[in-house]
Image (cartoon, grey):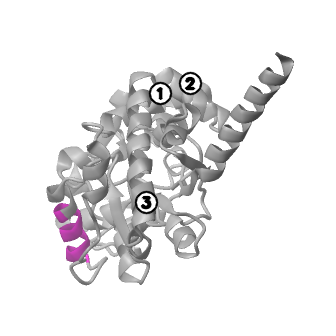
Amino acid sequence: MKKIMMTLMAGAFSLASAQAMAADKVTLQLKWVAQGQFGGYYVAKDKGFYEEEGLDVTIKPGGPDIAPEQVIAGGGADVIVDWMGGALVAREKGVPLVNIAQPFQKSGLEMICPKDGPVKNEADFKGRTLGVWFFGNEYPFFAWMNKLGLKTDGGKDGVTVLKQSFDVQPLVQKQADCISVMTYNEYWQAIDAGFKPEDLVVFNYTEMGNDLLEDGLYAREDKLKDPAFKESMVKFVRASMKGWKYAIDNPDEAAEIVMDNGGQDENHQKRMMGEVAKLIGDGSGVLKPELYERTVKALLDQKIITKQPEGAYTTEITDAALK
């Protein structure tokens, strides 16, 4: 009997080992550090959704000195999380990025200003200092200023752009009249710093119709020509969106999983998960063509990209993932 049990255990171990060896390895590069913004991916890994699809997924956190476009260009990732502005700029420069899914269907970008300050509406921007993130996050802001007819060179007929760190210190220290925030992150940092919601003037990019597509999934066009890789991306997207749906339904548990993977401040992560859930839309990960076209037009109008991109997205991955 003991021999039979040992044989069965050995067989089970061999099967598990064979399955592990057969799993397709996929490396995901995030746009920022481990936080609720990427909760769906961490949940998909923790809950075994990737494993169920036969994938062995490595999730690499980002940071201030990490550009996802450069990482994938150098072969350090198979798929990245990126904002479409940055991805299309990289594509025009020779990195053949293709949007394969769009988990964030709404923008979380805002600009906030103290209500007791000089800015009450868009007409008050002229001559003011506005905090803006760079590293590919500046494109929605420049498109907005272009729409308003405001120059961004610091002249009296435009605005002065302060290259903002990823926090709210420029507002706290009065270095800027307004700063950039995300609904799920820096806005709440401002609240934690002592600002009350009623004390802020909020410009929400989505509500103003100035939103450009944010967290999407991008792979290299040349790699997508390989049927095996393409199938891996279908499995990856399907499992990722399953992870997002679980995270939305179980935000506190998702926040705990993020914490286990390096997230900071559990209460902040729980709050972030609740806000991120508002941006996921229908949870399909499908890119809406009209939002793509609007993003492209804004980038072209501002000359952030110089020509109409071709082949910059595909719906084949999400179409197959949804079947």
> Which quarter of the figure is the C terminus placed in?
top left
Q: CA distance from mark 3 to mark 2?
A: 26 Å
> Which quarter of the figure is the N terminus placed in?
top right
Q: CA distance from mark 1 to mark 2?
A: 6 Å
The crowd level at tag 3 (other Cα within 10 Å; few <14, some 14-19, many 20+) is many
- Near-viewer residue (7 or 270): 7
Q: CA distance from mark 1 to mark 3?
A: 23 Å
Q: Which residues are magenta?
A: 293-302
When the figure is inspected, residue 44 is found, relative to residue 124, above or below; the finding is above
Name which residue lies at 33% across and 46% down.
104
Q: Are marks 1 and 2 in contact (CB under 8 Å)?
A: yes
The residue pinned by badge 2 equals 267
Answer with mark 3 or mark 2, whichever residue precedes in sequence.
3
Tell us which disc is closer to us: 1 or 3: 1
Q: Residue furthest left?
A: 290
When the figure is inspected, residue 251 is found, relative to residue 37, above or below; the finding is above
| SS majority, magenta | helix
Query: Which quadrant holds residue 289?
Result: bottom left
Query: Which quadrant holds residue 176?
Result: bottom left
Name which residue lies at 19% across and 53% down.
288
